[in-house]
Amino acid sequence: MKFDTPAGANPIDKLKVVGRATSRIEGKYKTTGAAPYAYEHQEIVPAPAYGFVVGSAIAKGRIAHMDIVDAKAAPGVIAVLTTLDYSTPLPLGWLNFAHLFGGAQIAHYHQAIALVIAETFEQARAAAALVRTEYVRAPGKFDLARESASVPLAPNTDKTKPPIETVGNFESVFAAALVKIDQTYTTPDESHAMMEPHASIAAWDGDKLTVWGSLQNLFLGKLSLATALSIPPQNIRIHSPYIGGGFGGKLFIRADVVLAALGAKAIGRPVKVALARPFVINNTTHRPATIQRVRLGATRDGRLTAISHFSICGNQPGGSSETAVDQTKLLYAAPNRETYMKLAVLDLPEGNAMRAPGEASGMMALEIAMDELAEKLGIDPVELRILNDTQVDPQNPQRAFSERHLVECLRVGSERFGWSKRNPKPGQVREGRWLIGMGVAAGFRNSFLVKAGARVCLEKSGRLTVETNMTDVGTGSYTILAQTAAEMMGVSLDKVTINLGDSDFPMVGCGSGGQLGANSSTSGLYAACVKLRKAVAERLGFNPAEATFADGKVSVGNRSVPLAQAVATEPLVAEDSIEGGVLDKTYQQSTFASHFAEVAVDIYTGETRMRRMLAVCDAGRIINPKAARSQIIGAMTMGVGAALMEELAVDKRFGFFVNHDLASYEVPVHGDIPEQEVIFLDYPDDKSSPMKAKGVGELGLCGVGAAIANAVYNATGVRVRDYPITLDKYLDKLPQVA
Ligand code: MOS
């Protein structure tokens, strides 16, 4: 089904199942331990061998020699594969650029250099410690700030645009602006820190490979793995039914999958490989650090006349930049604008997608700058954002936003949060030893519809079974797909079975990523259900255009027949996909939010505590308000980490992330955040898809960090522009009024 004109009224609009707060249909499997994760699947693969990955101890250089004699002779060891078994790196899978295995060259610390395979995990791990490697170390570049001076412009990810995007004349208008801000902000390297580490089981049957993995996108995973192993993609089948979190870290194949496949081939027996937690952080990907300069020029009454956002980022050769300037192209009106990025080559591990890549980091800078501008102007920061709202793409004014209710997000949020009680003068509100502050930021993230398909099968019993290669990364895909099928076919949720995470099923291009999955995968299923409705109606002798589907029956006028009667002997099967892309060009499709935060800062110790958070979100139709709320709350929590805690500490001499475990890479937990609330405006967007929905999983993060930073400033009067806002950055500047 092509989606190239706005959706009219359709069966989803009835909202009997869609739009209702619905608990996870797979929740009971997860909470009882019945849901198999990647390293499990004991029933299907009962006797695998265990692989343990050895990582490089240097960050840059080459391997001179590897001695595996002792490792091979260790108890239980079946085989040892080393990177020197291959003369060059394995070919790169699509969108992978840091090499995964093969050859003597070392591109980053903890690059996989060997796989030790043994009868038990403990034997493999013990033997891995006996692999002795001699290296020739080469000098590396590990310091983004130092490298940033002399690097080229980063290529624009949108190839139709030049690397520097400009409108009007930024420099001269900014120079003449009566009120201006020119500040530099930094965000650190961050880790996904998902609960389940990367893990895979691989089994060969002749030249056919089956993988049980933890991958967000099976379409991408299959193609990448085929490239890396130099085998045809149709020889690979990947299962990833349950994923213990990914946040972008499992969008791409990593060493676990590749080495499990190579190991299983080498020993002629299934092999399972999990990346040990201390290995995940330097072996896999992370969100790369940025240095961002934001310049804002405004009239005295607060209208932006000039906006510039520049961001620099580092990555492995061939890597891409964190697109931190993207939201600045769209968020606020201003006639003169420029955005550009630079990319330094670094020898740190690969930087790649982490939840809301680009906007998450970019909003952390832009939305502090807006707070600084509001203060300079003496305008309320909520009002400043409202004053500079735009209903059209500011770089391309004939292109309107499909739906944009940012102003309402800000107004509703400020009302519900009690924003009027905020004292605009910082450092004034005191409760005992605590300094109290409130902060606000806008939230913004784009929304797309990508190609997605599904197969839906109606059985004689009246049961519907859905198959797609979509994944559920912990977001609620199972549940929203069940809601969609139930709504379309007029049955209750318990009549629907959803099968996900099998690469042989119809393709969802995005998998779970880029907050594209909910809207795209349900729309693909919508298309398949339209076909099934037609087939059912025809079988029952109804005009498909007139037939309604409700309460397990199909009806036209006063004739009504049970749905299952359409099935003779063989189940009725329909398959289709959704393809958008046209309305994306005519309309800018984005999601919006306002984020409010209240913090308390201990005036003696500088400890910051979250007190309250509120997000008001405008993200199209909300398919499942309960799952969506969980997504937003999780993202807000991640925003607390980004604002106050999370930072991969770079060892700039030896080139690695020092805090490579969950004891030293700190993330917030329940006890850190006493109160979080989410409000959805729920404006269906008929340009986004037949579901009229958008994504929420990343929106909930974009802007949160800045709202908290602004609250800390309001509490203390100390402006910290380098994340995370840890007490060492402001303790000596707190008011001396204790
Ligand atoms: Mo997301 S970073 O696209 O999993």
Image: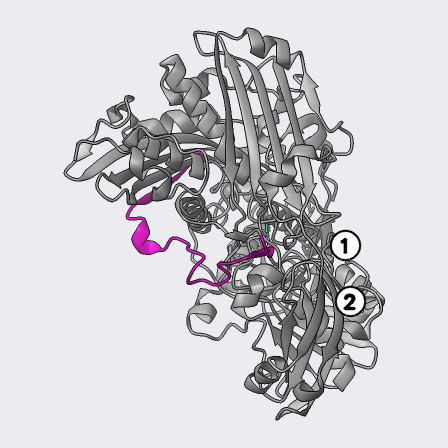
Q: Position of residue 166 (x, y in %)?
A: 68, 19
Q: Quick one: label 1, few (<14), some, or many (20+) residues within 10 Å? A: some
**Badge number at residue 94:** 1
- Numbered range of the magenta stretch: 653-681
Residue 338 as seen in the image, left or right of residue 367: right
The amino acid type, in three-letter code, at marker 1 is Trp
The amino acid type, in three-letter code, at marker 2 is Ala
Q: CA distance from mark 2 to mark 1?
A: 22 Å
Give the answer, above or below, for where 17 lies relative to 234: above
The quarter of the picture where residue 731 lies is top left
Residue ID at (74%, 69%)? 237
Image quadrant in which the C terminus is located: top left
Q: Position of residue 41 (x, y in %)?
A: 59, 78
Residue ID at (71%, 83%)? 68
Determine whether the beta carbon of the residue marked 1 sits less than 8 angstroms from the nearest atom of ligand 1: no
Q: Position of residue 32 (x, y in %)?
A: 42, 73
Residue ID at (69%, 46%)? 543
Give the answer, above or below, for where 336 lies relative to 328: above
Q: Quick one: label 2, few (<14), some, or many (20+) residues within 10 Å? A: many
SS under mark 2: loop
Q: Nearer the viewer, residue 690 or 374?
A: 374
Image quadrant in which the N terminus is located: top right
**Badge number at residue 104:** 2
Residue 162 in magenta? no
